[in-house]
Image (cartoon, rainbow, N blue to C red):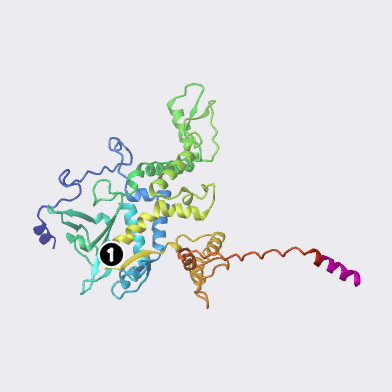
Amino acid sequence: MLASVRARIGALLSPGSAVGSGGWRPLIKEPYTGAWQNNAPPVTVDAALSNPTVFRCVSLISGDVAKTPLSLVQTDASGIWTAATSAAFSPVLRTPNRYQNFGQLLESWMLSKLLAGNTYTLKERDARGVVVGLHVLDPSLVRPLVAPDGAIYYELTGAAELAGIPSTGVAAPAREIIHDRWNCAFHPLIGLSPLFAVGGVATMANMIQSSSAEFFSKGGRPSGLLVAPSEIDPKTAARLSEAWHSLGPGKTAVVGYGMKYQDIGTSAVDSELVAQTDSAVATIAGAFGVPVSMVDSSKQPPYANSEATQRQYHAQCLQIHLVGIERALDAGLELPAPYGTEFDLDSLIWMDTATRSKAAIDASGVMTINEVRHKFYGLGPVPGGDTLYLQQQMYSLESLQARDVAPAPALPETPAPEPPAPAPTDEEIAAAVGLLAVS
């Protein structure tokens, strides 16, 4: 199959095989600048992953992505994404292959992306051409190939038995591979892992751990000298040295000749191992975008708010991966409109009790009781819970709109004042006085 593909696309350009014509740049894999002059070995994934901070960042990100539910959604008449079911696309999002569930597939997806900068997922199709299986390949065995006309192929340089490819030398067109990548600093088809930036820091931190382990295995004291006040012969010096080393750490030696012990090594305090270790932790966590408080629990932020930390973690670290996976699956599964895939972020950013209760109360009038119960508490619907409630003094938008467009009401007519009664005449007054006198 590889021979036929190569016959079709002609001369192939692979990463690093040609510089300039295809835009490829050589990748320098050094633990620190100038390491190759000092014969320092390159940083391997195994060596970097043995660092506790690197391991924590990788396992945290991959685990959080894997535990976040991913659903098939579609747009409704209002343009809002809602959960959907499709006989063609839903099965592969539940069971992507015969040996993994979808959470395990996402974990493998993220481990490959974090450690290699690239995730190559092979599609498995049925007779209809619909994708019914997904297989994450070993990134070290996959090599992108670019033809002179710009066509992209992926060559599998090793066997992938779980994916049903027992032989090597197989090339697949780009439409059969979902290629998710990030940090494409050198070429659009080559992603970079954060290990590229923190290789030197991880190597230094591992050396500190190895040095500390060796230091404490020798009793927790630095190397030193036995100094005699006067010269001694070589045989005596050899005998005292052998006797000293045979005791081992923690033993008390008795020597003569007025000898004194003098430290020549550097203690942990003098070398500031704690400060250097803290600096390495912060640097590695920053490269992966993980808040340092999620790697080292002793470095809690001043506000000590778990929700704020989770939102910072989502914005600075997880969002680029979640969105990348959604877009890669939308294109890779060839989902037609109006279908798509979407992560449920509510299950990832789960608020504390007080904040969740306040948010539920504030949502009154915007969400129904059943919607509030489902979103903030994970509870089912109740009778009568599909009605929106507002306070009595509040008006609906329709009534306010009707009031604004209606003509101004006419002012009520003011009745004319009655004319004042005429003043009584003298005769009327006299008659009234006479009547009063008679009575």
Residue at the location (44% across, 61% down)? 348
Q: Nearer the viewer, residue 31 or 267?
A: 31
Q: Quadrant of residue 136?
A: bottom left
Residue 58 drawn in magenta = no
Q: Nearer the viewer, residue 426 or 322?
A: 426
Q: Quadrant of residue 34?
A: top left
Answer left or right for 51 relative to 307: left
The x and y percentages for residue 223 are 47, 34
Answer left or right for 318 relative to 189: right
Quadrant of the drawing holding the C terminus? bottom right
Answer left or right for 134 relative to 266: left
The x and y percentages for residue 192 are 30, 49
Considering every residue shown, the one lying at the far bottom of the view is 383
The x and y percentages for residue 140 are 26, 54
What residue sits right under mark 1 in the picture? 135
Q: Nearer the viewer, residue 123 or 151?
A: 151
Decide if residue 431 is in sight here: yes
Residue at the location (80% across, 63% down)? 426
The vertical placement of 333 against 281, above or below, is below
Q: Amino acid at mark 1?
A: His
- In the image, the segment drawn in magenta is 429-439
Dominant secondary-structure state across the stretch colored magenta? helix
